[in-house]
Image: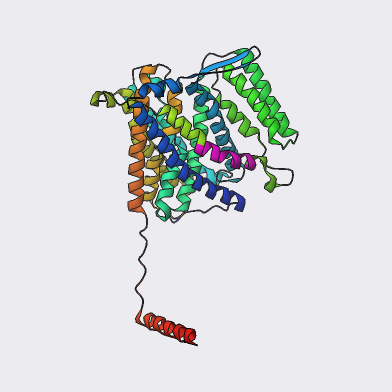
Amino acid sequence: MVEKAYVPKRHPAALTLIEEFFRLQAAGGIVLVAAALVALIWANSQWRSLYSDLIGLPVGVHVGALALDKPLLLWINDALMAVFFLLVALEIKREALEGELSSIRQAALPCIAAVGGMLGPALVYSAINWGDPVTMHGWAIPAATDIAFSLGVLALLGKRAPSSLKIFLLALAIIDDLGAIVIIAVFYTGDLSLLSLGLAAAGVVALITLNLAGVRRIAPYVLVGIFLWVCVLKSGVHATLAGVALGFAIPLRGVKGDGDSPLRHLEHMLHPWVTYGILPVFAFANAGVSLAGLSLSSILDPVTLGIALGLFLGKQIGVTGSTWFAVRLGLGTPPAGATWSQFYGMALLTGIGFTMSLFIGTLAFQAPEYSDAVRIGVLGGSLICALAGYFVLYAAGPRPLPDPPPRPADAREGAQCQSDLQEFERR
């Protein structure tokens, strides 16, 4: 697998941004886990009703005749996650224009791996839930990869995971996010309001006009983006797609060149807020599943089992299998310096669905009786993938060599240096 490896040349600024991205995700993954654990413990404590009351707290915004009244949980899932998808869109655009996805040669293998990694889980889930039109609606839940967790686990491995493997996983996860965006737009759209859709289209046209007119200030884009979010929210299309449209409209190049990039500036500004704020809040609001009465039958529920096995089996088979065939057919080049064992460990990590899987689960099943099954499947499958991927990569990675013992000559030289130093101090 190593003999045909290709190491792409990257812009220094892009490389610095990727390195910073890895550092953020490694720390952010810990915060994300902590938020999910707090929610899980709280939802199973004697104060569980307070947790339910908190995420169900009614929150309203009224501006003239316009009124938005939603529970706190929906404000998190519709408003805060729109900012998360804005950041995803910025990353996709940057990578497509000048990063790991900027050429066919660089993007070919991550694209094939991402497609295989989405088809595999969907097929596994569908096979388990075949014949039930209600539960089949959740086929896309295990198809998404959580960038924060997967890169966080890789970061914990240090030099045991080649940097090329981390970059490959980043590219794969970004394409995976793009696929999730398409799935949400096509398959999880409710009843449409033509008036709101028309206003949203006008907002998109305004964003395109700002871009073509050479506007480089971020504020006009944000103002139009807020208007677009309200219109999309009222249209029946999921509101997070407004964040995607806004992200794609932000210009990459600034007036003074690459160093004055509005896209890079906004991406850099949003990263800590999303990583340490929005995603942990989302995890806290959506991971609070009650484990009371948990039994083997509930674990073997078709929805729970389909999600868990989709993440664990579907992802590793889809990513590894599609990549292996693509390399054998000469359709792409594998990560430099990575063995197939290490690649398989990375494929296991792509089964960490968490944030995106929980989010798609809220769209797939509106009925509350499915919420616990979705959460148990996502949390269980993601945990198994994280542990399995870590141990496979740890075992497959190179072991650091111990420091060699000092040679006798080196020891004599050291003693002579110490003697000379003492003599110098006496003088």
Give residue 60's quadrant in the image: top right
Give residue 412's quadrant in the image: bottom left
Q: Quick check: can you spot residue 334?
A: no
Q: Which residues are magenta?
A: 264-276
> Outermost residue, right direction?
213
Which residue is depicted at the point 69% across and 45% down?
260
Which residue is depicted at the point 38% across and 41% down?
321
Q: Nearer the viewer, residue 256 or 60?
A: 60
Which residue is depicted at the point 69% across and 30% down?
208
Q: Main secondary structure of the magenta part?
A: helix
Q: Is residue 129 left or right of residue 117?
A: left
Residue 389 in the image, given as x and y percentages of width and height:
36, 44
Q: Is residue 248 above or below residue 47?
A: below
Q: Nearer the viewer, residue 269 or 392?
A: 269
Say how the picture is coloured.
Answer: rainbow
> Outermost residue, top direction?
65
Give residue 409's quadrant in the image: bottom left
